[in-house]
Amino acid sequence: MSPRPPTHAGTTHDAAKVRVVVTDALGLQRVLTLLTGRHHAFTRLSAEEAGTGRWTVGVDLLATPDEVDLVVARLHRLPCVLTVDVTLAGRLASTA
């Protein structure tokens, strides 16, 4: 687990739950590489096979809403990503 990111004046880090469905095990590796390479403050990380070769990745992280939006945008750029669902501080955002 990474240390809590520094808080800049006026920004707060909230707990966010990100759920990503990818096409295959190679896609799982790409998502994990993208997420770990950015030094996000993870509090939980899980991956499980979702049937027909697909994988579901669940990540709990501490981030500002802008950082979460950036993570989602980066995930959507990966061709192996089928869906990204995000829950942040009581709001539910879902994108496909």
Image: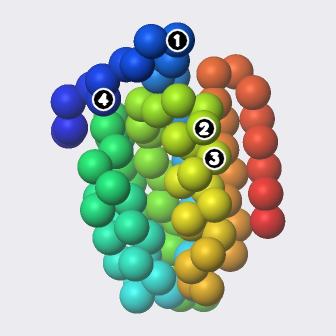
Disc number lying in front (2 or 1) = 1
Mark toward the start of the polypeptide (4 vs 1)? 4
Quadrant of the frame with the C terminus: bottom right
Tell me the residue that label 4 is attached to: 5
Residue 82 is at least partly visible in this image: yes
Nearest the viewer among 46 and 26 is 26
Q: Residue at x 48, y 61 (%)?
A: 57
Question: Where 87 falls versus 80 (above or below)?
Answer: above
Mark toward the start of the polypeptide (4 vs 3)? 4
User: Mark 4: which secondary structure?
Assistant: loop
- Residue 94, x across and y down, in percent: 78, 50
Quadrant of the frame with the N terminus: top left
User: Mark 1: which secondary structure?
Assistant: loop
> Distance between the Cα atoms at labels 2 and 1?
13 Å
Tell me the residue that label 3 is attached to: 69
User: Mark 2: which secondary structure?
Assistant: helix
Question: Contact (CB < 8 A) between labels 2 and 3?
Answer: yes
Please give the label number shown on residue 66. 2
> Distance between the Cα atoms at labels 3 and 1?
18 Å
Tell me the residue that label 1 is attached to: 10
- Residue 68, x across and y down, in percent: 57, 42
